[in-house]
Image: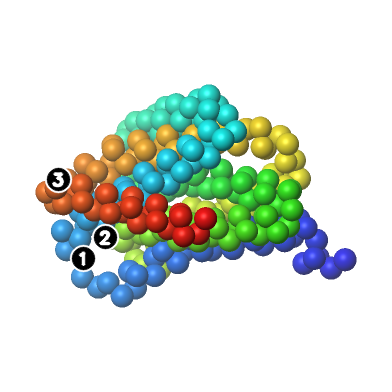
C-alpha cells in the first residue's frame, strides 16, 4: 500500500486541508486598500458575531457528549484566558510588532484563543475518520468550509490594526495548524480523545466568549455607535447561522 493510501496519511492530509482553508478568510483584504475608523469598528463587531456563533456551536456539540464536562471546560477556558491576559499585560512584547502589527498583545491573545479552538476541531476530524472514511471526509470538508469565516474573523481584527493581508493569511493558517497535529493521535486513540472532547470544546468556547466581551466589543464601541455595533454583531451571527444550516 502506497503512503498516500494509508488511512493515517489521509487523515493528516484532510486535516491539513481544513487548516489551509482558514487562510481563505483573509482574501478580501487583498482588495481593500483604505480602512476607515468606521470600518474598523464594524470589523470588530463582525468578528465578535462570528466568534459568538462559533462558540455556541462548540457548546452545543459538547452538550451532545457531556454537559457538565463542557461547562467545566468553559470555566477552565475563561480562567486560563484571564490569567494569560494578566500575564501579558505585565510584559513587554516589542518583538511581535513587526510580525503581527497593531495591538500586538491583544492580537497575540486573540491568536492564542483561536489556536486553542483548533485543537478541538482537530480531535473532531480524527474521531470522525475513526468511524468511517466517508464520514471523516464529510466532517473534514464541513470544518474546512467553517474555517473560512474563522479566518475572516482573525483578519478582521488583524488587518485593520496594521497587519498585512499576506501575514493575515499566514496567521489564520497558523491558528488552525493544531487540526492536522491533533487529528492523527485522535484517529489512533479514538476512545481516549472522544472522552475528553466535550471539555476541549467547552474550553475553546469559554475563551472565545471572554475575548468577545473583554476586547472586541469594547474596541468596536470606541469606533461606532452601540446601535451600529449591535446591528453588525447580529448580522454576523445570522450569517454564520445560515452558513451552518447550508453546510449541514
Q: Identify the image quadrant of the N terminus.
A: bottom right
- For the point 31% across and 75% down, the residue is 31
Residue 97: tell me if it is visible: no
- Reply above or below: 228 against 55: below
Q: Along the horizontal axis of the image, is 95 left or right of 198?
A: left
In x, y percent, where is residue 120? 56, 43
Structural distance between the alpha carbons of marks 2 and 1: 6 Å
Mark 1 or 3: in front is 3
- For the point 61% across and 55% down, the residue is 139
Mark 1 and mark 3 lie on one chain; the one further toward the N terminus is 1
Q: Nearer the viewer, residue 142 or 20?
A: 142
Mark 3 and mark 2 lie on one chain; the one further toward the N terminus is 2
In x, y percent, where is residue 99? 39, 58
In x, y percent, where is residue 220? 21, 48
Q: Which residue is mark 3?
A: 226
- Which residue is situated farthest in the left direction here? 225
Q: Along the horizontal axis of the image, is 3 left or right of 16?
A: right
- Circle number at residue 160: 2
Q: Quadrant of residue 85?
A: top left
Structural distance between the alpha carbons of marks 3 and 2: 20 Å
Does the residue at mark 2 contact the one at mark 1 (Cβ under 8 Å)? yes
Q: Which residue is mark 1?
A: 35
Q: Along the horizontal axis of the image, is 144 left or right of 210?
A: right
Mark 2 and mark 1 lie on one chain; the one further toward the N terminus is 1
Amino acid at each position: 500500500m502506497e503512503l498516500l493510501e494509508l488511512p493515517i496519511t489521509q487523515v493528516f492530509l484532510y486535516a491539513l486541508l481544513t487548516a489551509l482553508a482558514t487562510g481563505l478568510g483573509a482574501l478580501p483584504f487583498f482588495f481593500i486598500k483604505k480602512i476607515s475608523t468606521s470600518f474598523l469598528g464594524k470589523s470588530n463587531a463582525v468578528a465578535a458575531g462570528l466568534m459568538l456563533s462559533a462558540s455556541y456551536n462548540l457548546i452545543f456539540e459538547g452538550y451532545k457528549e457531556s454537559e457538565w464536562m463542557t461547562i467545566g471546560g468553559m470555566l477552565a477556558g475563561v480562567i486560563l484566558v484571564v490569567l494569560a491576559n494578566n500575564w501579558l499585560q505585565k510584559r513587554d512584547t516589542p518583538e511581535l510588532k513587526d510580525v503581527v502589527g497593531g495591538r500586538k498583545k491583544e492580537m497575540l491573545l486573540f491568536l492564542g484563543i483561536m489556536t486553542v479552538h483548533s485543537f478541538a476541531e482537530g480531535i473532531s476530524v480524527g474521531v470522525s475518520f475513526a468511524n468511517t472514511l466517508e464520514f471523516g471526509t464529510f466532517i473534514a470538508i464541513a470544518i474546512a468550509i467553517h474555517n473560512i469565516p474563522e479566518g475572516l474573523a482573525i483578519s478582521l481584527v488583524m488587518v485593520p490594526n496594521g497587519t498585512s493581508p499576506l501575514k493575515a493569511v499566514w496567521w489564520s493558517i497558523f491558528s488552525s495548524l493544531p487540526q492536522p497535529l491533533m487529528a492523527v493521535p485522535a484517529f489512533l486513540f479514538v476512545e481516549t480523545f472522544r472522552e475528553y472532547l466535550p471539555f476541549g470544546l467547552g474550553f475553546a468556547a469559554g475563551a472565545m466568549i471572554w475575548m468577545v466581551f473583554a476586547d472586541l466589543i469594547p474596541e468596536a464601541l470606541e469606533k461606532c455607535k452601540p446601535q451600529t455595533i449591535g446591528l453588525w454583531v447580529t448580522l454576523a451571527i445570522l450569517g454564520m447561522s445560515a452558513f451552518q444550516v447550508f453546510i449541514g
